[in-house]
Amino acid sequence: MPPPDSTRSDDADADAAAEGRPRGGGRPGGERLGAARLARGGFQDSGRAGRLLEEVLERLGGPDAEPEVDVTALVADLGAGADPDAALLLLVRLLDPRSTGADGRRCDELALPVVRAGGEPRRRLLSLLGGSAALGETLLRHPEHVRDVAEGLSPEPWSIVEAVRGQRGRAGMDALRVAYRCQLLRVATADLTSPEPVALLPAVGGALADLASAALEGALLLARAEVEDEQTCALTVVAMGKTGGRELNYISDVDVIFLAAPRSGAPESTALAVGGRLATAVMRICGESTAEGALWQVDAALRPEGKNGPLVRSLDSHREYYQRWAKTWEFQALLKARVVAGDGDLGRRWLELVEPMVWEAAGRENFVDEVQSMRRRVEQHVRRDEVDRQIKLGPGGLRDIEFSVQLLQLVHGRADPALRSRTTLEALAALRDGGYVGREDAQALDEAYRLLRCLEHRVQLHRMKRTHLMPTAEADLRRLGRSLGDRGDADRAVLQRWKGVRREVRRLHERLFYRPLLSAVARLSSDEARLSPEAARARLAALGFRDPAGAMRHLEALTEGVSRRATIQRHLLPVMLSWFADGADPDAGLLAFRRISDALGTTHWYLGMLRDEGSAAQRLARVLSSSRYAVDLLIRSPETVALLGDEAELVAPDKDALVARMTAAATRQESAGEAFASVRSVRAKELVRIVLGDLAAGWEGPLVRQALSDLTDAYLEGALGVATRRVLARRGEDAAAALLLVGMGRLGGREVGYASDADVMFVYDPLPEASPELAAEQAVEIVTELRKGLTGPGPDPVLELDAGLRPEGRAGPLVRSLEGYRSYYERWSAGWESQALLRARPVAGDPGLGEAFVEMVRPLRWPDGGIDDAAVREIRKLKARMEAERLPRGADPRTHLKLGMGGLSDVEWVAQLLQLRHAHDHPGLRTTSTIDALRAAEEAGLLSEQDQEPLVQAWCVASQLRDAGIVWRGRPVDSVPSDLRDAEGMSRVMRRGPGSGASLAQDWRRTARHAREVVERLLYGNRPPRTGGEGASPGRAGGSPSRTRPDAPSRDRRTDGFGRPRVASPPRDAGHFPPPRRDPFGRSSRERRGEDGTGPAGP
């Protein structure tokens, strides 16, 4: 506190004026300073404080009181402590001439010189009195210790032993207590007067542990003085828990283990019997209450067999127990074992015995699960009415930090001796330096541990009672807050600070303590965990890496050097190797990991995420070893690996949110190319999210297709907005037309796969008072801009727009007005076009135009009364013809996923036939989804459950296989692969389990055969199609009109099979042909075809 100055006198005069008293001195104590000033000084009962202060000043006066006491400085010294009221009351008692110590000396004779002199000695004394009522009582009993407090003497633990040397009995026990408390006063004084008590915490805990160790040594001296034949036994006291870790509280049981050995030629049985008596005496000497009270209880429950086992054991008995019967928690407890008293040589031999067992304990079966279960049990045993006040045992308490640190130590300490520390904060620093815990997390845990320990110390100091609960009374909280330096609303401040720390500790505990990485590391041998070259080579071969030498080169590149990046990767890779091996291509997984780490390894978050965040590392390993498609996406946008760090990120995207993101990204760009690139970039990142959700979060097929469909819708909406704004800005015109993109095929059915193009039709409608010619011009230019923007240069996957299902196909105009579509469909449309329109769905553009288009095509796809028998016969003929002609040359109809027997086309034609015939009567059939249509047909009684199930299963499995093919290979597949490696890779993507690739083709053929039986019965009326122009053998199958435009019957026929008139040549609107198709990564159809020249027919 600053020295008194004129400002204080002015304040005192102001207080006097406020209270109606004369300015200046005139009256002593509280009246001289005023109640308001005392309140500002931290006193809660200023009236009482004033009266007590008068007593103090009266006792400080007298003929020898030179110089006169500065009252303001005295009040300031009192106010510097945690509880000024309590300090003042204890000071009054200490200065009372009637107060005498245990040895009869007057307290005031020893305290008055310190209080009169002022300065740091007085401030130390008053801080102790205000911080601990119990230690104040100790000074009243032993005023000779006032000097120890006032002079701020450093603790001297060994003086405790010297104080009892040569003593015995009760006198020795009292001497032990007096000497211990004298040293305790020194520790508490340094603690309570520290300007940074949280920073001082480790030194305080260490000093308290040293005092306990010295007290145990002193107790052992006293025990030997009273036990017969003590010379026949060498006894060692091993401290456990907080004493062993040198992080003891002010009041705590002292956990120990005793061990004995014969001395002076005595037999072991004699030594153990004498050792038992010595140990019992030590526990009694420390724990029994005398005129000087008790020290603390000595608890030997952590010994082998606990309270059911002998109190003292030999070295050999310990060895046998720990090798044969010890439980996991016992090795965790031994982590803090430290010899503190008795025979040092015997203690060293015991440590040499148990320490190797401690650091190999993590290799025990279910070690990590057992430690985690133990923490949960500790928490469950906390009383419900105390759980929210627990500093130690509750959620976010000290035990969360200790268990986290100890588990990380035990798991990683097998391979890293630097982690083998008994002290929590030292171990935490070693975990930080070794890269096992992030720097920020380690800093947060370090600060939290210090604060929580300080809180625990302070609540114990007040009454020197064992407690780990936050107080609830306002006065107790205020004292606690002030003891940590808070002023003002100290009670609220300390409570808020504690609650914030609890939340942060719990968050970090759950992230570190439940890392999947820990269980995986624990299952490794010590050599495997160290990733030594010899162990790595053997393990790579055993795990099934095809090129162990190449994999070894990757490992060396990832782990060489002393950088933090290399250090963390040395921790991760021993475990990740087995996770790579769980995928179908571990070599590719390791190579991809190296490429991604090269791109991201220097970032502040990447490796920390893999180490700390749930299952991120395991998920990444699975993805990289299972999917070339995902690897391609991640390499192009490596920062998206961050999605694996948070399960909440792996959720299906929301279409409206995606459109908003794409629009926002595009509007920030200056050029059209940059705007389209930003929209493509958003799509690319969302594709990563979807494939990661598929591979790492277990999304089912319907969710994947829904997410891909929503993403495609949003992408087209966002890109159309860019195209529209750019064209209108370039032309300097207002919009003259509403524009619509109609999704067809799988896009229209919301059944988009990874390899799907976007089948669309472009529709426009002139706005009121707009010129039809201008509307057409704008619509064509916008669509041209859109197509150009979607296929622009850049690394992101390309989505091809295919308008081949528009009227007249590629021979017709690309963009057509709503009236143009109406005219065409009324006069010239073919039957297959009605079938294709079953999948038509507005996906982007003007909602009102979308409604108008849907209403316009309603009679075509849901014809009143359904299609007639002639139309049904035409559909059958067309399907049979396509089965004969559309299957690629050399393709096996049994394994072709789209055009083969029981494939996608078969199922879709059945669903579409049911819709065309019955949707007019059954609204549930009016859907663009194949699966929804089949289920609606069953609900309507049009399809039996026995028929519906194989159709749905075949369609879903075929869709899964096509998606699995592109996810595994990075390019589309048409058929179930005959190559076993590809079949295995696709099976793993489908989560069928290791080794299931061998049966993939057989399983598909069985599924498809069951579906084909239903198709032949429902589509062909149990008549297998004939070979030739009107049919094909049952062994052939063909495409769907929703994707492939067939050659329609001759145009000069008067009507089609749907009873509609035909006209030779429909009129055209403006338009142009689409560019050649490219796959999702920009490769042309020629580039992605096999050597036989055949390529994928498209989704």
Image (cartoon, helix red, strand yellow):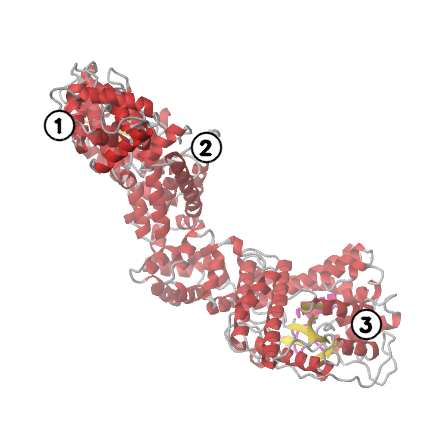
**Residue 593: percent from the left, percent from the top?**
43, 64
Please tell me whether mark 2 or mark 3 is closer to you in this view.
Answer: 2
Q: Is residue 1021 toward the left or the right of residue 551 in the image?
A: right
Secondary structure mostly taken by the magenta-highlighted segment of the chain: loop
**Residue 167: percent from the left, percent from the top?**
15, 18
Whether the magenta-drawn stretch holds residue 895 is answered as yes
Q: Is residue 655 toward the left or the right of residue 387 in the image?
A: right
Whether the magenta-drawn stretch holds residue 155 is answered as no
Residue carrying label 3: 876
Type of amino acid under label 3: Arg
Foreground residue, 839 or 202?
202
Residue carrying label 2: 387
Residue carrying label 1: 67
Q: Quadrant of residue 328?
A: top left
Foreground residue, 1007 or 412?
412
Which segment is the magenta one? 886-907
**Disc 1 to disc 3: CB gap under 8 Å:** no
Rendered view: 635 above or below 177: below
Q: Residues within 10 Å of mark 1 (few under 14, many from 20)?
A: few
Foreground residue, 1047 or 609?
609
Type of amino acid under label 2: Val
Cα–Cα gap, marks 1 and 2 = 54 Å
Rendered view: 917 above or below 1076: above
**Residue 320: percent from the left, percent from the top?**
32, 34
The residue under the point 86% across, 76% down is 1060
Residue 229 visible to the viewer: no
Cα–Cα gap, marks 1 and 3 = 119 Å
Please tell me whether mark 1 or mark 3 is closer to you in this view.
Answer: 1
Type of amino acid under label 1: Pro
Question: Is disc 1 placed on a helix, strand or loop?
Answer: loop
